[in-house]
Image: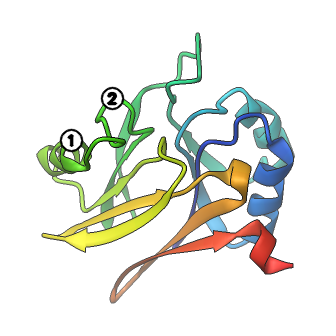
Amino acid sequence: MRILVLSDSHRHIANLVEAISNEPTAEIIYFLGDGTYEMDEVREIFKEKMFIVVRGNCDFMDTVPLCDIRNVDTCKIYASHGATENVKLSYIGIKRAAKEQMCNIALFGHTHEKYYSYEDGLHLFNPGSIKEGSYGVIDIMENGVMCFHKNLFDIK
């Protein structure tokens, strides 16, 4: 199963559309906040996709949840923008939140910086900012999980 991970669009809807178009095999699209209002328009374009959206610190007055926890294929995923876990200071909060929920993948944005680590059974993944062209892809396969970064501007 392929998952597309996007965050921090900050009104750059064309980048959202391009990233989703570039990953036609992605079955699920996570959007990790700071641009949730743009997702209504994107959902209309890609009606066949499943979208999981969480609110960021710049998504004022939006009612989508601050985090999402769910089983996806063989994994349990914790998704948050990262502001409430203070990811700009350290990753301790997001790791703790994911571990408390017994998740093996934790997704976050907020810093606009790509990040990936695997430690103690937890994949910690930040796709970077789609505003700057950065996004993430997760492949959940029979033999494990692969997380990797892509950039819109490298593809052309």
Q: Residue at x 67, y 33 (%)?
A: 35
Q: Which kind of residue does numbered mark 2 sit on?
A: Thr
Q: Amino acid at mark 1?
A: Gly
**Residue located 54% across and 49% down the image:** 112
Assess disc 1: are there few (<14), some (14-19) or many (≥20) residues with their C-alpha within 10 Å of its C-alpha: some
Q: Which mark is residue 127?
A: none
Residue at image point 78% right, 47% down = 47
Q: How is the image coloured?
A: rainbow
Cα separation between marks 1 and 2: 8 Å
The answer to which image quadrant residue 142 occupies is bottom left
Vertical arrangement, residue 150 with respect to residue 4, above or below: below
Looking at this rendering, what residue extends furthest in the bottom direction? 143
Q: Where in the figure is residue 94, as x and y percent of width and height?
A: 26, 45
Horizontal side of residue 109 vs 132, given as left or right? left
Residue 97 locus on image (x, y percent): 20, 42
Q: Between 130 and 6, which is closer to the camera in this rendering?
A: 130
Q: Is residue 38 visible?
A: yes
Q: Which residue is mark 1?
A: 93
Percent coordinates x, y for residue 149 in the rendering:
56, 72
- Whether the residues at callouts 1 and 2 have beta carbons within 8 Å, the answer is yes
Q: Which residue is mark 2?
A: 84
At numbered mark 2, what does the secondary structure look like: helix, strand or loop? loop
In the rendered view, tell whether residue 128 sits above or below residue 13.
below
Q: Secondary structure at mark 1?
A: helix
Q: Mark 1 vs mark 2: which is more N-terminal? A: 2
Question: At x 21% / y 51%, what residue is drawn?
Answer: 95
Looking at the rendered structure, the number of numbered marks drawn on it comes to 2
Is the residue 99 above or below the residue 57 in the image?
below
Note whether residue 49 is visible: no
Q: Is residue 98 left or right of residue 41?
A: left
